[in-house]
Image: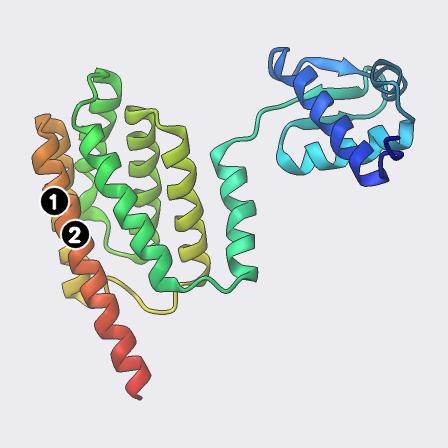
Amino acid sequence: MAGKPSKEGLVSAAAGRMKEMILAREPDAQIGSLPDVAKALGVGVVTVQQAARVLEHEGFLKVRRGNGGGYYGARPNAASLGRAIAGFLQVNQTREHEAIEIMTLLDCDLISAAALATDETLRARLRDLGKRIDACDTAEQRGAFEQEMQDIIYAMVDRPLMEMLARVTMEHYSSHAHLPIYPGTDGAERWKQERHNIIYAILRGDPGLARFEAQRRREDILERLAKAQSMAGGQ
């Protein structure tokens, strides 16, 4: 005879069925009030509340209170998932070097794929962005440029899984970087030249050249980071 489902099992099952209800509707559509959902699932309101907290954390649910309130479906995005997983990496003390390795490896594929993009609006945005490279003289300006360039490239290639992984590693590295990759005036000039080269290759529509430039940047970054870590360890 089958045993009675555990409390955790009931909540997990309810969360799974609620997720099915959410995905069967358009984003932001209401799936019902607390009593409505409990009745539809055949469980108690407490179980639904616990399942709702799980789905809120995962980015699938929004709870609205007051008139017109209830449970509304949502869709998790790469940025929110990235922040959540970056927190996991922090708890597990993922190394700075490991984050850079993953981030730059993903960039090689994303940048190469971007060279095949044909959306002229996105290509124009990237072209206009490239004109601002030489004006990026501070770390803050370069950081803002990187974010905008990444957003354009993600839109050009439409690879949501790779985007999420890239955002995760970038979020983790940005929050925990201790060793600068582009220090001083020489570093700033190297950063500018790398971006010029990568954007040129993408706009030329040459995936081989784009991958070459991304790979060359990756090798240079990893070599410089290894040297910086070695020097820091020897002090």
* The one of 43 and 130 positioned closer to us in this rendering: 43
Residue positioned most to the front = 1
Residue at horizontal 82 percent and vertical 25 percent from the top: 65
Q: Is residue 83 left or right of residue 103?
A: right
Position of the C terminus, as image quadrant, is bottom left
Q: Is residue 185 above or below residue 148?
A: below
Position of the N terminus, as image quadrant, is top right
Q: CA distance from mark 1 to mark 2?
A: 6 Å
Quarter occupied by residue 64:
top right
Q: Which mark is residue 124?
A: none
Q: Which residue is mark 1?
A: 213
Residue at horizontal 58 percent and vertical 25 percent from the top: 75
Q: Which mark is residue 217?
A: 2
* The one of 126 and 205 positioned closer to us in this rendering: 205
Q: Is residue 218 above or below residue 31?
A: below
* The one of 7 and 180 positioned closer to us in this rendering: 7
Q: Provide residue 126's location: percent of width, then percent of height.
A: 22, 30
Residue at horizontal 33 percent and vertical 69 percent from the top: 179
Q: Is residue 44 left or right of residue 170?
A: right
Q: Provide residue 5's location: percent of width, then percent of height.
A: 85, 34
Q: Provide residue 124's location: percent of width, then percent of height.
A: 21, 23
Which amino acid, mark 2?
Answer: Arg
Which amino acid, mark 1?
Answer: Glu
Q: Dot 2, crowdedness within 10 Å: few (<14), some or many (≥20)?
A: many
Quarter occupied by residue 201:
top left
Q: Is residue 2 left or right of residue 104?
A: right
Dots 1 and 2: beta carbons under 8 Å? yes
